[in-house]
Amino acid sequence: MVQITIDGKKIDVPEGITILEAARRNGIYIPTLCFHPRLTYFGGCRLCIVEVKGFLRPVTACTTTVNKDMEVNTSTAELEELRKLILELILSDHPHDCMLCEKAGACTLQELAYTYGVDGFQFAGERRRYSKRDGNPFIERDLEKCILCGRCVKVCREIQGVEAIDFGYRGFKAKICTNFEEDLDCEFCGQCVQVCPTGALTGKLWARKGRQMSLREVETVCPYCGTGCNITVHVNRNEIAKVTAREDSWNEGWLCVKGRFGYRFANSPERLTVPLIRKVPRGEGAPEKVEDLFREATWEEALDLVASRLLEIKEAHGPDSIAGLSSARCTNEENYLFQKFIRAVVGTNNVDHCARL
Amino acid sequence: MKKKLDQILKKYHKRNENIIFLLQEVQESFGYIPREAIDYFARKLQIAPSKFYGVATFYAQFRLTPMGKNNITVCCGTACHVRGAERIISGLRRELGLDGENDTTEDGEFTLEEVACLGTCSFAPVVLVNGDVRGRANADRLVKEIRKMKKK
Amino acid sequence: MENNVVIRVCMGPAGIAAGGRDVLERFREALASAGLDASVKEHCSSHQVGCLGLCARDVLVEVHTDGQKHTYQYVKPDMVERIVTEHIAGGKPVSEWLVDDSFDAFYEKQVKVVLSHCGVLDPEDIDDYIASGGYEAIGRILKKCLPEMVIDEIKASGLRGRGGAGFPTGLKWELAREAAGDRKYMICNADEGDPGAFMDRAVIEGNPHAVIEGMMIGAFSIGASKGYVYIRAEYPLAVERLKLAIAQARKKGLLGKAILGTKFSFDIEIKLGAGAFVCGEETALIASIEGERGMPRSKPPFPVNRGLWQCPTVINNVETLANIPYIMRKGASWFASYGTEKSRGTKVFALTGKIRNTGLIEVPMGITLREILYDIGGGTESGKEIKAVQTGGPSGGCIPASMFDLHVDYESLAKVGSIVGSGGMIVLDEDDCMVNMARYFIQFTQAESCGKCVPCRVGTKRVLEILDRITQGRGRPDDIAKLERLCKGIKSTSLCGLGQTAPNPVLSTLKYFREEYEAHIIDKKCPARVCKALLTYWILEETCTGCGACRRACPAEAISGEKKKPHRIDPEKCIRCGMCYEVCKFSSVERE
């Protein structure tokens, strides 16, 4: 541990951490755009500049590690003026269409613009113009809103290991590019969407489905696989508008394409809501309409039918003629109960699970 | 092309080089960086193609489109600028049908480049047509010359 | 007597352009037919650099007879015969063709350390360098010295980085030596990109072995066994010379394993730049050697602790390294005897612009600008007053004539808002517009910004846009305030040296030539008559002969008039290209 002083407050922090980490651990706010706690540092947005005694010019808190007896000032009139200028510059090259932007209300850039009272017209000038032309069904890339913080590039490389995108060109023309600027062709995990601090990357599925303020957030577990990622389901009028994951969950905010974008089944009219019992015996050919093949039943009736059929089979052919295959979408406890049932009640070891495949 | 790329790859492994070296060698061999070359090396070296693209677009040395058969270079140094290099460029672009940021015609016949001072300011504006100097150039004369070249 | 005659014909690029080859050929013929025995050397034939100062007066010919040297200027082939008969055979120099006093003045105040062997040694021959005392220092160091002793010597010499920022070289080496790590690297930064600076090219083309020896000494001091020279691909001759020099050094056992029978192993690899000015910045240079986009990384950590592939790395500029062998040969106190207390030694500058003697000069630190401009540079060619001098290229600033007694050293130049930088010195007179000058440099840095950080990527773009509109007559009253706010912000918040220094040309011209900005913005006038959108052209009826030359030259068909009657310019149509002004033989076209 070393002792440092931030804004006149003496604090003890572990050696080797950055000024930004030290500040955040002690509840001191420093604005950032390009910093992300789970990604390597970048130092491009320059918003986290702080004054350190002994340094001629401000340094970025996200890249500078603490030293013994370091004296840091996170907010002076001069620093705030510089931050304001940086925001003015970012916004001078940004579409002023917050009223239409999917990210409005949940946008770090918008929030900072509001806090610093910056409209971005002070240095109005040329703006980057790109046409949106991504053919993929999941991720909307609006590169005019990109502030080149590099989070998407890094998450794709450091977390997902895909490297579908990288920085291209340079200077004012710098741009996040796929190979030869083709349509995105990747796993569509959407990790980049999750970390984007502006409206540059959004989910196509959740366009116009409701602003953050009108969404109800429901914490739950991803229904897909045994990994059991924690997800936050954003619900608008009893319909899922989008799925995100929280960084403080054990999956650290990361999801796969299914968990993030594969939620539309929940509101599908074809979803089964009651048990169905087959009307036509097997081997007699299926009628054209589903209604002619199945009939709706109550849970009591359905379970009784299953129980009696299992008993019949067991008695006629022995327990080893039965096998149980459970789902990765069940919880551990459910799967435990299932194997217990197959082994102890049915009396066979023929039990398996789809996640083992 | 495959053969050449193989040779470059061998050189790369032997000298323990980086991808800038690869791209420099490719450009040296083909005059530009063909897409196939990036795909080839990305596959062979297990390096993401987006990274090659990022490097290729960062450095001014690399071009991603082939040069035209005829190369017209307009000097944009101070002296030429003053004497109407811009007019020549806009005239030539119109004649060649170049739009946006394209510098080469679709049929691959002409490439129009702009360069910093060629150091022959006394003949400004200066245009190089396939390496030959056209001093005190004007758009009309050049357009005529281009039309002649097109006929051939 | 004839045996002692040596004739050197300057064959630098300018020498060749002025007909150097013909002159050389004539000398050979004339000497042969006169039956004289003299060796004719192609002075500078392989070292363009040595003659840069002289090139304005090419073809220059040096005639050495019995230890006496006479230099002829503007030599043409038909002058050769007379020089041979009167001077070489007759012993009487042709006095009217000899260089005048101002020629000697060009050299008088110069002190050549780095350039001392440029233009004298054959850069393609390692033996020439060795004969001049080359590789003696590294030989002695390897046998007798500890790395710490070398570092102490360099520290005592007071040498500071010649690439721009002026960081003490000895201290840099010490930090790298003390940094933890088994693998360390020595890098020579030869990515000289400032428009108007070419001393690094000159040193490598003229004396590549000095750079190699400097790198060896540095590598030995910090404990590196691998070195890189990062050099621009745009310098093909320098690259060739360097490759050859490295090959020769390897052959002599000066590079490679167990050098000179000691435990020290070191080898050098050349890395070619791919066209990005920002790669002159050391962390971007490292990224580029690693094969990445040349985007700078945040400092700290500094390269001396975590550089190339995260290993301790020293990056020194070409000129810095070329000083090292001379310091180790002649001693720290010799080197420290030149210069000022904080800026020791000499510095090479590239003197260009509105100056009589353009070229490369090497002067002791602390010399005044006035001495450089008037004693060495010889003032302007036109006789007009020098208005300002721009030092440090796109990272530097303009220094007005009122400050020409300023001593040229790191601190003094920084104090007035400029920098020593890589050593470009562009001389400006009353015909140069300071706003346009600032615009030119910002345009350069803006195009070379890597785009990583906001202030440089967007900020320099906005500065350029404002300067664009000022020079086009669309400046707004609050533009000066905006420029100042932007520039100060970019300076203090940019990630790397490129952005941090990019506003210097604007800030310094705003400071010293504010009235020129105001003239552009408020009066819509360009006092230097450079910004063409602010000019108006008209024809003086009294002197116009109606010859029609201007009418024919006008690309916008803005000039009309009957033959032999005064013409007039339609200001609506005029595009202010200045063609009429150029072609008029009667000075009848006026502009303001």
Image (tube, coloured by chain):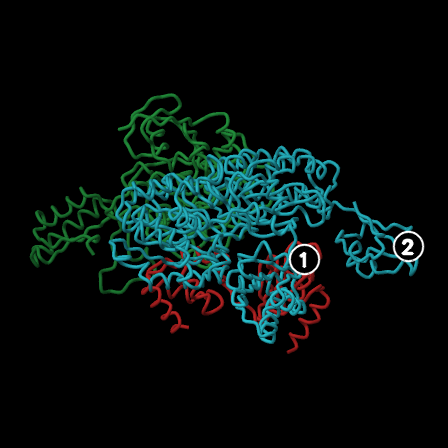
Question: For the point 65% across and 63% down, which residue is it?
Answer: C75
Rendered cyan, the chain in question is: C
Q: In this orientation, which residue lies closer to the viewer: C401 or C303?
A: C401
Which residue is nearer to you in this view: C251 or C231?
C251
Residue beneath disc 1: B80
Q: Image check: A72 left or right of C462?
A: left
Q: Residues within 10 Å of mark 1 (few under 14, many from 20)?
A: many
Left or right for B125, reference C425: right
x and y, in percent, of residue C79 in the image: 67, 67
Q: Is residue A45 left or right of residue A23?
A: right
Task: Give above or below for C174 relative to C319.
Answer: above
Q: Distance between the residues labelled 1 and 2?
A: 29 Å
- Where A104 falls versus C245 (above or below)? above
Q: Is mark 2 on a helix, strand or loop?
A: loop
Q: Can residue C518 be seen in this view?
A: yes
Chain letter for mark 2 = C
| Residue located 64% across and 59% down the image | C73
In this view of the protein, can residue A91 be seen by the observer? no
Determine which quarter of the picture holds residue A294.
bottom left
Q: Mark 1 lies on which chain?
A: B
* Residue C321 rendering spot, x and y as whole percentages: 41, 49
Residue underneath mark 2 = C566
Q: In this view, does C515 lie above or below B56?
A: above
* Figure colour of chain B: red
Please state, as top left, top right, bottom left or bottom right, where the C terminus of chain C lies in the image.
Answer: top right
- Badge 1 and badge 2 in a common chain: no
Q: Residue flagged by tag 1: what amino acid is it?
A: Cys
Query: What element does badge 1 sit on?
Result: helix
In the figure, what tint was chain A given?
green
The circle drawn on residue B123 is none
Query: Could you tell me the amino acid type at mark 2?
Result: Pro
Q: How many labels does the image show?
A: 2
